[in-house]
Image: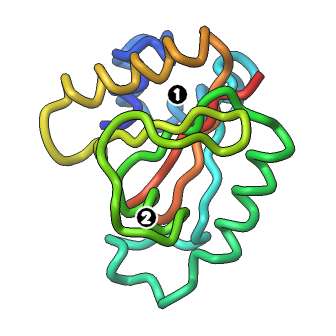
Amino acid sequence: MFWYLLNRSGLLEEAESDLKDDRLLKRIYDTKFLPKYGLNFLNLVDRPTVDVTQLKHGEEQAGIRRARKIILAYKPRVVCFIGKIAFNKFYGSKKCEWGWQAGINDSRVYLMHFPIRGPAEVRVKELREVKEASDDQKLSHVRASGASEFLTARH
């Protein structure tokens, strides 16, 4: 589902039929995702989970430190957290609203809804807002766990 949202928002420019084929999707990821689109996945917890309840307390801390280093090193124009769980884990808080947040250094921060729950139109609109804010700069995608993620738009 997330691949279709990225495509419909304009962050990707691929035939939707290619996104249904695992072999073609892997080729898109391996050859275009970072070089052409500037997108990349990073896990804050480097193991698959059905949902965040399967994480051990503090298990995400090493990944959060790594993500902070990446944000500081690459100075993305926009960081987009996908879902409140990723945002709350990253910031160590439970208070947040959807949309634009206080920045991380010079990076703007956006909190969007998790892509699997709710209407796709809302997620596409949010991703378009992130795309516009990044001034068509390249984006990276960081995943907090199997259930929580964020994007970073780099220079």
> How far across and down, in percent of the image, does residue 124 sit?
30, 23
Farthest residue to the left: give it: 119
- Along the line of sight, the residue nearer the viewer: 50 or 81: 81
Residue 63 makes an appearance in the image:
yes
- Along the line of sight, the residue nearer the viewer: 33 or 77: 77
Asked if labels 2 and 1 touch by Cβ distance under 8 angstroms, the answer is no
Element at label 2 = helix
Element at label 1 = helix
The picture quadrant where one finds residue 9 is: top left
> How far across and down, in percent of the image, does residue 91 sit?
53, 64
Residue 93 lies, with reference to residue 73, above or below; the image says below
What residue is drawn where x is 64% and y is 19%? 37
What residue is drawn where x is 41% and y is 31%? 3
Residue, disc 1: 24
In the image: residue 96, left or right of residue 47: left
Q: Marks 1 and 2: which is nearer the front?
A: 2
The picture quadrant where one finds residue 59 is: bottom right
